[in-house]
Amino acid sequence: MNESSKGLGKGMIFVAWILALGLLTLFFNGFLENQHNPNQDLRTQDYKDGIREVVLQRNRKGHYVANGTINGQPVVFFLDTGATIVSIPAHLNHRLNLPQGRSMIANTANGTITTYSTTLDKIALGNIELHNVRASLNPHNNSDEILLGMSFLKHLEFTQRGNTLILRQYPKL
C-alpha cells in the first residue's frame, strides 16, 4: 500500500466515525424530545354528537406537554391548571401575530411580574379549537413552551386516569 491510500483509508474511517456520532446525536435528541413531549402526534376522536376528544400521555416528569397551534402556527403547550390564563413567552408574539395590549400585574411562583394582555384569534390542541381566548405575553419567560392555562382549559372537561389525561370539548348548546 502506498502512503496516499493509507491516508485515504484513515480519512474514510474518520468520516465514518463523524457520521456515526452525528446519527447517534440525532437519535438521542429525538428520544429525549419524545420523553419530554410524548404528545407530538395527538390521539383525537370526533363523536357523532359533536364531542371532540384529545388523549394525552404524561411525560416522565409527570407533566402534560403537547403540540398544538396558535393562529395556525405550531407551538408546544405545557398544560397548567394553576395558570389563570394562557401565558405566552413575549419573544413569540411576532411569529404568532399577537398584538401587545395593556400591561398587567401577574402573581407567579417566582413573584410579581408585569405581563401584557393579548387575545388569541384561534388556539387548537388537536381537534379541540377555541376562538378569542384571553392570554398574556410574558417578557420574563425565555422558553418556547406556552402555559396552557384556564382561559382555555375551563371550556373543556378533563379526566385523569393513571398517566393519561382525556380532554373533551362539548358543542355549545
Image: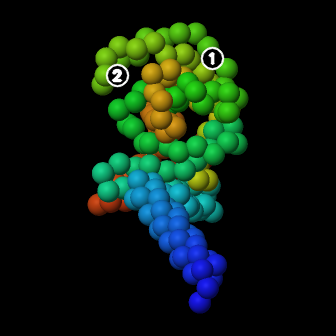
Percent of width and height locating residue 107? 35, 17
* Number of residues whose C-alpha sits closer than 10 Å to that of mark 2, classed few (under 14), some (14–19) or many (20 or more): few
Residue 12: image tag: none
- The Cα atoms of the two marked residues, 1 and 2, are separated by 20 Å
Question: Quadrant location of residue 4?
Answer: bottom right
Dot 2: element: strand
Looking at the figure, which quarter contains the C terminus?
top right
Residue 11 drawn above or below residue 149: below
Q: Is residue 110 above or below residue 172?
A: above
Q: Residue furthest front?
A: 2
Q: Which residue is mark 2?
A: 108
Screen quadrant of the N terminus: bottom right
At x 63% / y 17%, what residue is drawn? 100
Looking at the picture, which amino acid does disc 1 mark?
Gln
Q: Residue at x 52, y 28 (%)?
A: 89
Q: Earlier in the sequence, mark 1 or mark 2?
A: 1
Residue 116 horizontal/vertical position (percent): 54, 16
Mark 1 sits on what residue? 100
Residue drawn at point x = 68 percent, y = 33 percent = 95
Dot 1 falls on a residue whose secondary structure is: loop
Which residue is located at x 32 percent, y 56 percent? 60
Against 120, residue 24 (above or below) is: below
Judge by depth and name the residue closer to the eye, 26 or 137.
Answer: 26
Q: Nearer the viewer, residue 50 or 78?
A: 78
Where residue 38 appears, as percent x and y from the top left, is: 44, 59
